[in-house]
Image (cartoon, coloured by chain):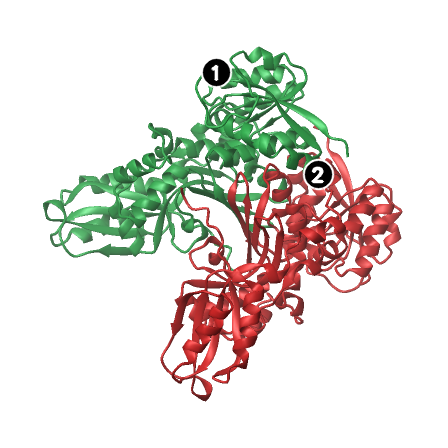
Chain colours: A green, B red
Amino acid sequence: MAEKTVRVGLVGFGTIGCGVAKLMSEEADSIAAKTGLRLELAHVVDIDTESPRPVTPAGLVVTNDINRLLNDDSVTIGVELVGGTDTAKEIQLQMLRAGKDVVTANKALVAEHGSELYAAAHQNGRCIAFEASCAGGIPIVSAIRTGLAANSITAIYGIVNGTCNYILSNMTSKNEDFAEALAQAQEKGYAEADPTLDINGTDSAHKLAILASIAFGCDISLGDIYVEGIEAVTKDDIRYATEMGYSLKLLAIGQRNAQNKVSLRVHPSFIAKDSALARVEGPFNAISIFGSAVGQVMFYGRGAGMMPTASAVVADIIDVALGNSATTFRHLQLKPRNETASMIEKIDDCSSRFYIRVMAADKPGVVARYGQILGDHEISISGALQHEGTGPQNSVPVVITTHPTQERNMVAALSELETLDVIAGKPICIRIVDIPEDKEA
Amino acid sequence: MAEKTVRVGLVGFGTIGCGVAKLMSEEADSIAAKTGLRLELAHVVDIDTESPRPVTPAGLVVTNDINRLLNDDSVTIGVELVGGTDTAKEIQLQMLRAGKDVVTANKALVAEHGSELYAAAHQNGRCIAFEASCAGGIPIVSAIRTGLAANSITAIYGIVNGTCNYILSNMTSKNEDFAEALAQAQEKGYAEADPTLDINGTDSAHKLAILASIAFGCDISLGDIYVEGIEAVTKDDIRYATEMGYSLKLLAIGQRNAQNKVSLRVHPSFIAKDSALARVEGPFNAISIFGSAVGQVMFYGRGAGMMPTASAVVADIIDVALGNSATTFRHLQLKPRNETASMIEKIDDCSSRFYIRVMAADKPGVVARYGQILGDHEISISGALQHEGTGPQNSVPVVITTHPTQERNMVAALSELETLDVIAGKPICIRIVDIPEDKEA
């Protein structure tokens, strides 16, 4: 079969850009054999044309003039790997207006300005492919949009930030403090010098916004997502909860409840330690999806890194070049904001189980008052753990787990608990997430 | 956006057929919203038009006249869910000749006659979609063909038969005999009345033939695959190996070796018990794929059952109706048999580690003779386990694990071991598979 040449322009020649160039060059023949497409990297654009790169395929010239790409009508696909939301957005819009389909790994941009970009693409008769924006090499976007297209998605539970999972895994297995584990992650290259957006949950929220948008078919904005990072997690709480049968993960959760409202949250979550997601360790990502017909399916792999992310970018280039992305993208019609807003469950209304730890004075009657306050707010205790021995100021850690209760009850109970003079400091509160396990009948 | 009506004809109205009808009916609006397609079940054909079915959507008429489907030009997609290879093949060929694209869940047919059917489809300008033939609701076929298209696949390790996994899980966790566990599986509906094709590995081999064909791009026949079932597995061997750190799974393995030959095997496999696949329990399926760029990705879910399989069938109907399947199918060009044959590694040449158990007479010098025979065949011992106490005829089980050696060495050593008068019965030999774990750097 005759090969079709596909000329690609790439903007942003950092780590991922180098991976894409490397992969397009190394797998060129194999891709041609499998797809009939001969991928050619026609232009590489970056403001930095000088610095040495980890990989530069032979003959590749880096230019800082994006117009060479935009004005080249033989280039049909533009890859945006600049990152950030301002310049990157302008670049994508320029590409679309210049008649190029867009492939991107930019989760922040897709999460924050997706609907605007999709509209621009529809207007220009082009498409945007963004598999690489979520969970690196795991083909999760295409799984939701095509492989599971016959299902109504009822829930998504994702470990979508490798940095946080690496830190929490090490806090658990090596009994490290958060600060120690973070330093380790930075040393190993799993956390950036400024890890803020990873550890505060923003990066996971970006990915959840994208995945939930396509899974639930509505235009989700970052503001719809309740976000809590892992900065305040202590190794003690991980240890106590481990004794009670839980593992700690930063989960990105999208759940459709019985009233058809969607709960969207990113927060540290204790999950049953024998659940599939609990076993995802180190820098790996995994996403469990529940579909009306398929039950639970889980996708696991490297959620970041040069070559895994490049794998997704080049898969998108192929899909766009074959015309399949255009077909799928044409039907990406998200419910607009004015319909979406009322579909989102407020965090106060969200029902969940909780892990609570207080440092209680080692005096008679403390536990009774603790229990009393919870009872007053209709919170029912499911389990408890109190080790003998003393903490700071002769306090002892008292851990309880609760049955499901609305978040607002817990908030009220916590603020009352804080005022108790027999409790030192602020109570620690971490949500327990019971992932339905789709166990054998 | 205007909806496009897609009229579908279905042949074979058993469990999966009912699931497809149910799903097409229940999710019709949701599918229309997501894809712009209004799926209509125009004809349902089965030789049995009378028996009550688990689900029959309102207004559905079952006919035994396939010509009503074939002669209806408004029907563009034919779904074959008859099963078996003779009638089903004829039905698919009739559908293709009648100008219909084909969707099928028939793994035996695709595995055994895939290339003939693909040729007929290409000839008629039609496509065949077979996502449902492998691993039920897990979108693994599309993951290999599109999501991982930028990768050269180096290996596939799959738990693709839920019956066997259920049996082995119960033999492990409940210390059941094979016969007990099989009876349990039959009672729970995870094994058929005649479970032969599941437990002897044929079903897994069918799925491996399909997955390996598309992953390695060659026309693989069943005869290329070395197949060993789980019938001879004992709970004792599972227990001994568990003590040594292994779990037993029936794995379907496709591996490209350094000489670019492909090893294709289905056999009971001891794998490290902390590996991702070891944790797949009960009737679930999981497939780990290693790609040149993506590293390890794993896909997990229900590999069988009415609704999970229907999920894959209807996803394929959508993909075909959107035209995407045709694009992907057009490039499904497998290396023909005359090129493929030389690419397949013979089982004798295959290198692997082994678990061996013999029942040795409790006499001096037995272990030395045992070790001597292995050494004579260049087999190096990696671990050993001998519990005190006696077995039948005062024999004791002596377990050893080996370093990698070629299969032919092991076959020769085993036949020599069998002749030893101090060893009772045949030695037990189970392969140990070291799945590369793609651990953190």
Which disc is residue B433 wearing?
A: none
Q: What residue does disc 2 label?
A: B328
Left or right: A141 as drawn, with respect to A263: right
**Residue at 52% from the left image edge and 64% from the top image edge:** B431
Residue A299 at x, y = what percent? 52, 45
Which disc is residue A49 wearing?
A: 1
Left or right: A399 as drawn, with respect to A36: left
Kindly identify the amino acid type of the residue bearing the numbered disc 1.
Answer: Thr
Kindly identify the amino acid type of the residue bearing the numbered disc 2.
Answer: Thr
Q: Name the subunit of mark 2.
A: B
Q: Quadrant of residue B32?
A: top right
Q: Nearer the viewer, residue B208 or B413?
A: B413
Helix, strand or loop under label 1: loop
Q: Residues within 10 Å of mark 1 (few under 14, many from 20)?
A: some
Helix, strand or loop under label 2: helix
Any part of residue B186 in sight: yes
Residue B180 at x, y = what percent? 54, 75
Q: Nearer the viewer, residue A41 or B7?
A: A41
Q: Nearer the viewer, residue B276 or B316?
A: B276
Mark 2 or 1, closer to the camera: 1
Question: Above or below — where is A115 with respect to A396?
Answer: above
| Gap in angstroms between the C-alphas marked 2 and 1 | 37 Å
Q: How many marks?
A: 2
Q: Nearer the viewer, residue B302 or B129?
A: B129
Q: Residues within 10 Å of mark 2 (few under 14, many from 20)?
A: many
Whether marks 2 and 1 lie on the same chain: no
Left or right: B319 as drawn, with respect to A166: right
**Residue at 86% from the left image edge and 54% from the top image edge:** B66
Residue B269 at x, y = what percent? 52, 63
